[in-house]
Image (cartoon, rainbow, N blue to C red):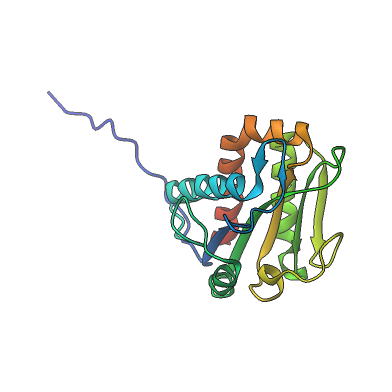
Amino acid sequence: MRWINHVKAVPHRPPQLRSVMISAGHSDTVPGIVANGYKEADIVQRFRDAVSIELKLLGIMHLLDGEPGENLPLREAVKIAARNEIAIEFHANGGGPGATGVETLSQAHNKPLGAELCSVTAEVLGIANRGAKPEGSGQHSRLAFVSQGGGIIHELFFLSNANDLHQFLQHQDELAKRVARVITDAARE
């Protein structure tokens, strides 16, 4: 009798060529927008932790701005971001109840990755794609995570919009997987 190995072979993965850091915007002391019964800091911290798990499953080494379940002050996150080739900080946007969509804010060299993050997020959540924008667009002027850390601010959705929030809550697991795949592809390019 011959034994058959039923263990699936792990497909060869291209090596990770770029260092990665992911961050959760805001904190307990600076909660960001509070709307529709949620705090931005809590939502993006859980999302960052979910993306971290997916990155681990995909074999991507990465740093966080704190341990799972916490995030460091912005000044610390900026220092970590500046030491990595890919740095993404998750946020939820705020505006009037009709404001909707996903956008990223970054320096010009990060706009292609920002555009890919926007595309995937808009597709998964079924919300508008507001696009990859420069750091100084809209209500923002100079963002330390972008200007000093060289990272990307990923405004996932508008927390002030009940439909955007509903879509995020319904699809956050799938979104974490898809965002992790985008980051993985960028880290292996």
Question: What is the quadrant of the C terminus in the image?
Answer: bottom right
Is 167 situated left or right of 67 in this image? Answer: right
Please name the residue shown 60% across and 44% down the image. Answer: 43
Q: Nearer the viewer, residue 35 or 114?
A: 35
Please name the residue shown 35% across and 41% down the image. Answer: 9
Q: Nearer the viewer, residue 113 or 80?
A: 80
Q: Nearer the viewer, residue 88 or 120?
A: 88
Q: Position of residue 86 (x, y in %)?
A: 59, 65
Please name the residue shown 69% across and 54% down the image. Answer: 154
Residue 33 higher or lower than 38, as above or below? below
Q: Position of residue 36 (x, y in %)?
A: 72, 36
Is 131 situated left or right of 28 in this image? Answer: right
Quadrant of the image occupied by residue 87: bottom right
Please name the residue shown 75% across and 41% down the image. Answer: 122
Is 171 situated left or right of 50 in this image? Answer: right
Residue 45 higher or lower than 152, as above or below? above
Q: Residue furthest left?
A: 1
Is 56 situated left or right of 40 in this image? Answer: left
Q: Position of residue 26 (x, y in %)?
A: 62, 57
Quadrant of the image occupied by residue 174: top right
